[in-house]
Image: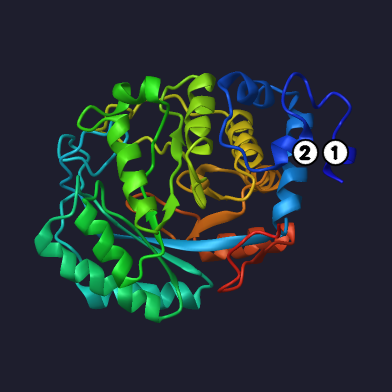
Amino acid sequence: MLETLMPPNAENGSPSAKTAAGTRHDWTREEAQAIHNMPFNDLLFRAHCVHREHFDPNTVQKCQLLSIKTGGCAEDCSYCSQSARYDTGLSASKLMAIEEVLKGARAAKANGATRYCMGAAWREPKKRDMDALLSMVSEVKSMGLETCMTLGMLTDEDVVQLKSAGLDYYNHNVDTSERYYSEIITTRTFADRLDTLARVREAGIKVCSGGILGLGETPTDRVDMLVTLANLPEHPESVPINMLMAVEGTPLEDAKPLDGVSFVRAIALARIIMPKSYVRLSAGRSEMSDELQAMCFFAGANSIFCGEQLLTTENPGEDADEALFAKLGLVAEASGASGTQG
């Protein structure tokens, strides 16, 4: 069916529609670049057809993100307000009390979220904090929510404990291409990121990994980042795509905003080369028009962060999302419905 829906010139040197809609782990940059650079209407059509093969196109997963430990991070990520190396006016805090985390989880569930993501501004978690983290996971999971954490790099012991506590997903973004990575972060390597993802996957925890657009990277860097994720032994179950929210005091405070068409191209490519993954609109939605978000959903995005705040940046909030969903005829994915159609 998909092949018959493809526009006549959709091939353009790229794989067949049938092959592109399947699950591959051997994408070349040239193949992915050819898809990324297709005429925009053809690219959207192709991505939307792939999306319909695997998901209900009018259903969007709602997740909520909570910063359980804010600021004071030893890393030097050039985009991050939480780095201790930059003067962004953000005060460092200790690990949040368990009950406060659970209060947020109950509110998230009441607002329709099916996954609760907990993030700590660390290079890596310390042993003294593990008991509290494990309790957060097990208690949130007992509410019927999917659990996700992002804590930096993990040891083998860390992943075993988190898996035993019931952690469903671990978020660890690659951020950008391997080529451009050292321009953004110097305190850990691109290989460190991939090692953590492999450790998480080996433990049986699902992977959430994506990147940030608008860091000053080239279009080829965006393609390379997505190819890296698509060529992992298993595709990440969730692929968050962030639009840079430039923060005063960081090295990227004056970064030029990425145009919407370029952002949508990346969403479409992610959908085509990782057809069964959830593609999440993450940071930057508060700066996007309804029309840009609608185009992203058409191109294959099917997950969002809800609530008024992400880790330290603004998010549209429940009222805005409710109005957007009503305008577009979208519905929130029901709890326990996570998964693809085929």
Nearer to the camera, 215 or 14: 14
Would residue 29 appear left or right of 146 to someone viewing this image? Answer: right
For the point 77% across and 20% down, which residue is it? 12
For the point 51% across and 35% down, which residue is it? 231
Where is residue 169 shown, x and y percent of the image? 41, 59
Would residue 335 appear left or right of 326 to someone viewing this image? Answer: left
Q: In terms of sequence position, does the residue under pointer 2 or pointer 1 come before the other?
A: 1
Where is residue 32 shown, x and y percent of the image? 62, 26
Which image quadrant is residue 117 in? bottom left
Where is residue 164 shown, x and y percent of the image? 30, 70
Q: Secondary structure at mark 2?
A: helix
Nearer to the camera, 263 or 327: 263
Do we see residue 133 in this rendering? Answer: yes
Location of residue 200 with respect to 99 vertically, above or below: above
> How many C-alpha atoms fall within 10 Å of the one at disc 2: few (<14), some, or many (≥20)?
few
The residue beneath circle 2 is: 18
Location of residue 123 with respect to 249 vertically, above or below: below
Would residue 129 appear left or right of 288 to someone viewing this image? Answer: left
Marks 2 & 1, CB-CB < 8 Å contact = yes
User: What label does residue 3 carry, if any?
Assistant: 1
User: What label does residue 246 carry, if any?
Assistant: none
Colour convention: rainbow
Query: Amino acid under label 1?
Result: Glu
Q: CA distance from mark 2 to mark 1?
A: 6 Å
The image quadrant where one finds the C terminus is bottom right
For the point 70% across and 36% down, which residue is it? 20
Where is residue 284 shown, x and y percent of the image? 48, 43
Would residue 147 appear left or right of 327 to someone viewing this image? Answer: left
For the point 9% across and 63% down, which residue is it? 128
